[in-house]
Amino acid sequence: MSRSPVAKPIVILTGAGISKESGLHTFRDPDGIWATVRVEDVATPEAFRRDPRRVHAFYNERRRGLLRPEVQPNAAHSALARLESEWPAPVLLVTQNIDDLHERAGSRNLRHMHGELLKSRCEACGNVTSGRDDLTIELACAACTAIGAMRPHVVWFGEMPFDLDEVYGALGRCGLFLSIGTSGNVYPAAGFVAEARAAGAHTVELNLEPSEGHTQFAQGFYGKAGEIVPAYVDRLLAARR
Ligand code: NAD
């Protein structure tokens, strides 16, 4: 990390690993969410058409889990909020997580590319609303009054992630790309490192262990996010002073 006269924009991609120490499960780890349910039963548009009650039950349980008082942002979330407020160039945080721990920690320039658990969307009119209560098939849309059309505002397998044009634009301009707590298995997010490299950015992976795609990164730091992310952010900010 050398001192540079001009701070360049940063793009950060986060995944489930950053929220693990806050008490939320990852997806593909041995104790992860996909060890207990099948993707095709709960996280596809076809699953929702086939058995909406089951899909609602899955996300209702996750929403209740997120709202437990003990689930709070950890030191890694806070460090990224500090980086955004102290770095002299734009910092875009792109998360695959549907929890709200980044915003609770203070991140503002944040995109939820896989949606948000605390929002729902009407499949009839597209209206998006915030809410903390369970979703059911009996619910009426507050905007168009259609009944049974409310779904979690999350991106299921086979659907297009949100805000991709903006994210690719930022990747093309960034000087540093950080990938934190993600296994790098789900595209298009898994391809962001290649975009950043093509733009000439320095690329860094911070994860519990090297991901399958770790060789694509110029540098890697491995350990718990709550420890390695604050330490990395401290070094990055100190190198600017
Ligand atoms: P993942 O479970 O695939 O990977 C988590 C990564 O975090 C692993 O590499 C693991 O080693 C690491 N990790 C675990 N504990 C850690 C810690 N304490 N500190 C640092 N790293 C730690 O999760 P992912 O990469 O986020 O998965 C990709 C995305 O796929 C998910 O975020 C999710 O948005 C998306 N997805 C969503 C749905 C859905 O419900 N709509 C379905 C499938 C996938």
Image (cartoon, rainbow, N blue to C red):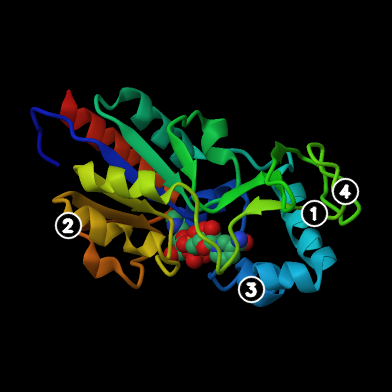
Q: Which mark is residue 149?
A: 1
Q: Left of 27 or right of it: where is 203?
A: left
Outermost residue, right side:
138
Q: Nearer the viewer, residue 63 or 152?
A: 152
Q: Mark 4 or mark 3, which is nearer the start of the sequence?
A: 3
Q: Which mark is residue 139?
A: 4
Residue 228 visible in the displayed image: no
- Number of other residues with Cα within 10 Å of mark 4, as a class: few under 14, some 14 to 19, many 20 or more: some
Classify mark 3 as within 8 Å of ligand 1 or not, answering yes or no: yes
Could you tell me the amino acid type at mark 1?
A: Ala
Q: Mark 1 or mark 4, which is nearer the start of the sequence?
A: 4
Report if the CB atoms under discs 4 and 1 are less than 8 Å apart.
Answer: no
Give the Cα distance between marks 2 and 4: 46 Å
Q: Secondary structure at mark 2?
A: helix
Q: Tell me the quarter of the picture where residue 28 sits.
A: bottom right
Could you tell me the amino acid type at mark 2?
A: Ala
- From the top left corner, tell me how far across and down residue 4 is, in percent: 9, 32
Which dot, 4 or 1, sits closer to the camera?
Answer: 1
Q: Left of 191 or right of it: where is 135?
A: right
Q: Secondary structure at mark 4?
A: loop
Could you tell me the amino acid type at mark 3?
A: Val
128 versus 183 height, above or below = above
Quickly name the residue at label 2: 198
Q: Which mark is residue 39?
A: 3
Report if the CB atoms under discs 2 and 4 are less than 8 Å apart.
Answer: no
- Number of other residues with Cα within 10 Å of mark 2, as a class: few under 14, some 14 to 19, many 20 or more: few
- From the top left corner, tell me how far across and down residue 97 is, in percent: 54, 51
